[in-house]
Amino acid sequence: MIHEKYGLGGLWHGTSAGILKTVPKYCTAIIVKDYMENKLPQNDPQSPTYKTDQLLRSACKSATAGIAGAALTNPLDVIRNEMFKTNKSLMSTVNSLLDEMGWRFILRGMGKNLVAVSVPVASTIFFTDALIQLSSEQ
């Protein structure tokens, strides 16, 4: 059991990296979504395909936001994963990664991370937009 081997604090090992990873990821995604909201052209409400156009617009915003959130926070995912592997503190882990790889560590696992992170983030944003659209129609 974790608490027997590392004490009560062992139950929270990696929490700081988890928070440092999750909060910026979603904040970045929302900032990018809002940016895209302002930059994408508005759809014509009189168009016969308006509902579909709105969903496609949302898909563009959501995909861009998910990819940005994943790419910009990839270094935090690397740090968190390394903390779990090595059982080191946050700063010790960062220093080890820098010693071992230099700043290249920020790109480690980027391809997998783009899929593993951007899909759930983009889906969350897209389905939220779709539910808001659906509820406003009723």
Image (cartoon, rainbow, N blue to C red):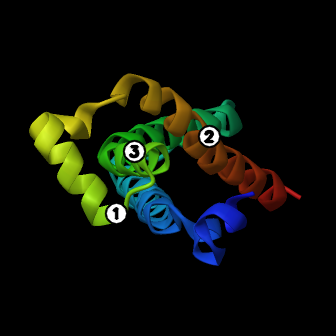
Disc 3 residue type (three-letter): Glu
SS for callout 3: helix
Residue 113: numbered disc: none
Along the line of sight, which residue is nearer the eye, 34 or 99?
A: 99
Image position, residue 94 (x, y; %): 24, 54
Out of 87 and 121, give the one closest to the viewer: 87
Mark 2 vs mark 3, foreground winner is 3
Q: Which mark is residue 120?
A: 2
Q: Position of residue 87 (x, y in %)?
A: 45, 54
- Residue under numbered circle 1: 90
The answer to whether the residues at label 2 and label 1 have Cβ atoms under 8 Å apart is: no
- Element type where label 1 sits in the image: helix
Residue 115, horizontal then vertical, whole percent:
50, 27
Q: How many marks?
A: 3
Say left or right for 128 vs 33.
Answer: right
Read off the residue under disc 3.
82
Residue 45 visible, this orientation: no
Please name the amino acid that badge 2 sits on.
Pro
Within-10-Å neighbours for mark 3: few <14, some 14–19, many 20+: many
Name the foreground residue: 55 vs 124: 124
Gap in Å between the C-alphas at discs 3 and 1? 9 Å
Q: Is residue 114 above or below residue 88?
A: above
Extreme front residue here?
5
Is 42 situated above or below 18?
Answer: above
Q: Residue at x 47, y 65 (%)?
A: 23
The N terminus, quarter of image:
bottom right
